[in-house]
Image (spheres, coloured by chain):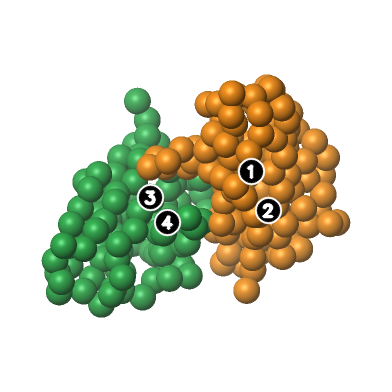
Amino acid sequence: DGGITQSPKYLFRKEGQNVTLSCEQNLNHDAMYWYRQDPGQGLRLIYYSQIVNDFQKGDIAEGYSVSREKKESFPLTVTSAQKNPTAFYLCASKRQVTDYQPQHFGDGTRLSIL
Amino acid sequence: QKEVEQNSGPLSVPEGAIASLNCTYSDRGSQSFFWYRQYSGKSPELIMSIYSNGDKEDGRFTAQLNKASQYVSLLIRDSQPSDSATYLCAVSAAGGTSYGKLTFGQGTILTVHP
């Protein structure tokens, strides 16, 4: 089945530690996105990528980093600089950045501080 | 700052009634409009897309768009308890490097009681 796979489902971070969230898609989509959702709030864009080896900062990129070495993969690293990382992280993709089609989401990773 | 505002909830309707969810947006150049449903603890699921003024119907769901008033709504007819969820309005920015980026409202919690 085609889809977006995020792992792990739950992740715990110790103070001062960097953690990496995985996002893989087999939909042959060029555009991929990372969002953060805090309780009772909508989604906020962290980073997005329209093609391999290219990515752009979203609205809340500070304390996060990404890479896009393969079309299928768009991992997100939550660095120790992100002081309030507890949130629900969602990866999304769509065919191209420049079309008007909707984004589709993975199942998400819930990150908490130990 | 481009914003998307949804009617404050929570919204409670009896089973079989019509639920009406509203959303306004500030970017007059927006081109694409989406409604996502999010069950508690799950990722958002696309339920409606609308791109031109007027109504679009899909089963029990009707999306309405009025670009002049910068307003988009979702009607759910014959509401069922399984419709109880948070509904997120999302708007796609237009132009330049904003293509493909979604701005989300804060969500409206809908409860359908038997």
How far separated are the C-alphas under marks 3 and 4? 17 Å
Q: How far apart are marks 4 and 2 (CA)?
A: 17 Å
Q: Which amino acid does label 3 sit on?
A: Cys
Q: Circle 3 sits on which residue? A: A91
Pick whichever of labels 3 and 4 is earlier in the sequence. Answer: 4
Chain holding disc 3: A
Residue type at tag 2: Asn
- Asked if labels 3 and 4 share a chain, the reply is yes
| The label number, if any, that marks residue A39 in the structure image | 4
Report whether residue A98 is seen: no
Real-space Cα separation, disc 1 to disc 4, in angstroms: 18 Å
Subunit ID for the residue under disc 1: B
Secondary structure beneath dot 4 equals loop
Query: Residue visible at 25% across and 50% down?
Result: A22
Q: Mark 4 lies on which chain?
A: A
Q: Which residue is drawn at 71% across and 60% down?
A: B25
| Relative vertical location of residue A13 with respect to residue B84 in this rendering, above or below | below
Q: What is the distance, in whole Å, between disc 1 and disc 2 at their CAs?
A: 9 Å
* Disc assigned to residue B7: 2
Q: Mark number for residue A20?
A: none
Callouts 1 and 3 on one subunit: no
In this rendering, is residue A53 above or below B88? Answer: below
Is B71 placed left or right of A28 in the picture?
Answer: right
From the image, state the color of chain B: orange
- Amino acid type of the residue that numbered disc 1 sits on in the rendered structure: Leu
Crowding near the residue tagged with mark 4, few <14, some 14–19, many ≥20 C-alpha atoms within 10 Å = few
Q: Position of residue A10 (x, y in %)?
A: 23, 48
Q: Where is residue A57 in the image (x, y as percent from the top left)?
A: 43, 70
Residue matched to label 1: B11
Q: Are marks 1 and 2 in contact (CB under 8 Å)?
A: yes
